[in-house]
Image (cartoon, helix red, strand yellow):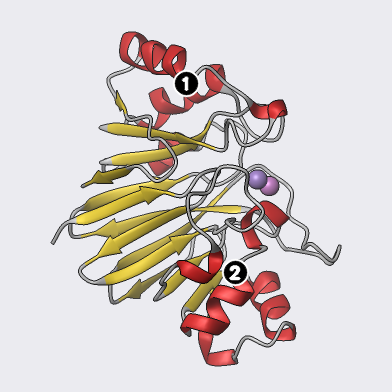
């Protein structure tokens, strides 16, 4: 079965996998670049990489409206329960751990980044996700700097890597080229850039460098743009 990925701007993605929708880090209502509002999306599962506002702000209202299962680290799941999300609608993963869901297997990876909730409470450690789907294996790095253990994440092959390239809060375009060399994915989609002036990047220039310096195919989407795996 195929997987259709839609970039919702910033680090937000929607995956349609065999009639199930998996949202990743939905940041929609306040995002300057989101093509949709939180009240308009569907979700069966929501994956949350860390506690920062630009990754969790819309999780609670979407989860309450849709009844979606939220997958996140222990501290974020505890915070979600305080916000009124039912105990059986959260599923804890911590780095290295994985779980089988109806749409595929999800493993949480490490990420080098901070993580606090919008109210200042502790958000656990930041993470990323590897999704093993029938259509292929996808790595969502989350917010992170470059790290050598990306070589481990690439073992077994990646059909797609989704990497931040905005710089300042995460790795920038140059470090993302090193990340691509470590991960060796077939394709790479950039995110976490052009949301606000501090993370504006020349994505066409980045794509040229990806083509000339790595073996990956760069796929630069517009917000609302889709890619099928
Ligand atoms: Ni962050
Ligand atoms: Mn972020």
- x and y, in percent, of residue 100 in the image: 33, 73
Residue 28 visible? The answer is yes
Tell me what residue is drawn at x 68 percent, y 57 percent. Answer: 125
SS for callout 1: helix
What separation in Å lies between label 2 and label 1 (alpha carbons)?
Answer: 28 Å
Quarter-of-image position of residue 59: bottom right
User: Which residue does the numbered mark 2 point to in the structure image?
Assistant: 59
| Left or right of 11 in this view: 185 | left
Tell me what residue is drawn at x 67 percent, y 54 percent. Answer: 30
Circle 2 residues within 10 Å: few <14, some 14–19, many ≥20: many
SS for callout 2: helix
Number of marks present in the image shown: 2
| Left or right of 83 in this view: 108 | left
Q: Is residue 185 above or below residue 227?
A: above
Quarter-of-image position of residue 189: top left
Tell me what residue is drawn at x 35 percent, y 32 percent. Answer: 188
- x and y, in percent, of residue 211 in the image: 31, 14
User: Which residue does the numbered mark 1 point to in the structure image?
Assistant: 203
Tell me what residue is drawn at x 33 percent, y 48 percent. Answer: 138
Q: Earlier in the sequence, mark 2 or mark 1?
A: 2
Residue 91 visible? The answer is no
| Left or right of 156 in this view: 56 | right
The N terminus lies in which quarter of the figure? bottom left
- x and y, in percent, of residue 89 in the image: 52, 86
- Report whether the residue tagged 1 is closer than 8 Å to ligand 2: no
Circle 1 residues within 10 Å: few <14, some 14–19, many ≥20: many
Ligand 2 occupies quarter: top right
Q: Which label sits on residue 149?
A: none
- x and y, in percent, of residue 23 in the image: 44, 63
């Amino acid at each position: 079965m195929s997987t259709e990925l839609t970039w919702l701007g910033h680090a937000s993605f929607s995956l349609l996998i065999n009639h199930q929708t998996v949202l990743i880090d939905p940041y929609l209502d306040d995002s300057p670049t989101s093509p949709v509002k939180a009240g308009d999306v569907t979700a069966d599962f929501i994956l949350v990489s860390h506690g920062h506002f630009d990754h969790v702000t819309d999780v609670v209202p979407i989860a309450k409206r849709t009844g979606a299962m939220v997958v996140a680290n222990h501290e974020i799941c505890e915070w979600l329960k305080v916000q009124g999300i039912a105990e059986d609608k959260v599923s804890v993963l911590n780095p290295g751990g994985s779980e089988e869901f109806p749409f595929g297997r999800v493993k949480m990876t490490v990420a080098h980044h901070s993580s606090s909730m919008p109210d200042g409470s502790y958000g656990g450690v930041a993470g990323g996700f590897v999704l093993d789907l029938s259509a292929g294996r996808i790595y969502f790095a989350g917010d992170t700097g470059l790290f050598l253990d990306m070589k481990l994440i690439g073992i077994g092959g990646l059909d797609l890597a989704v990497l931040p390239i905005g710089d300042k809060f995460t790795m920038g375009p140059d470090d993302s080229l090193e990340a691509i060399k470590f991960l060796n994915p077939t394709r790479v989609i950039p995110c976490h850039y052009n949301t606000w002036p501090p993370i504006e990047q020349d994505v066409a220039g980045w794509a040229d460098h990806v083509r000339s310096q790595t073996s990956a195919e760069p796929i630069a989407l517009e917000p609302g743009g889709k890619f099928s795996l």
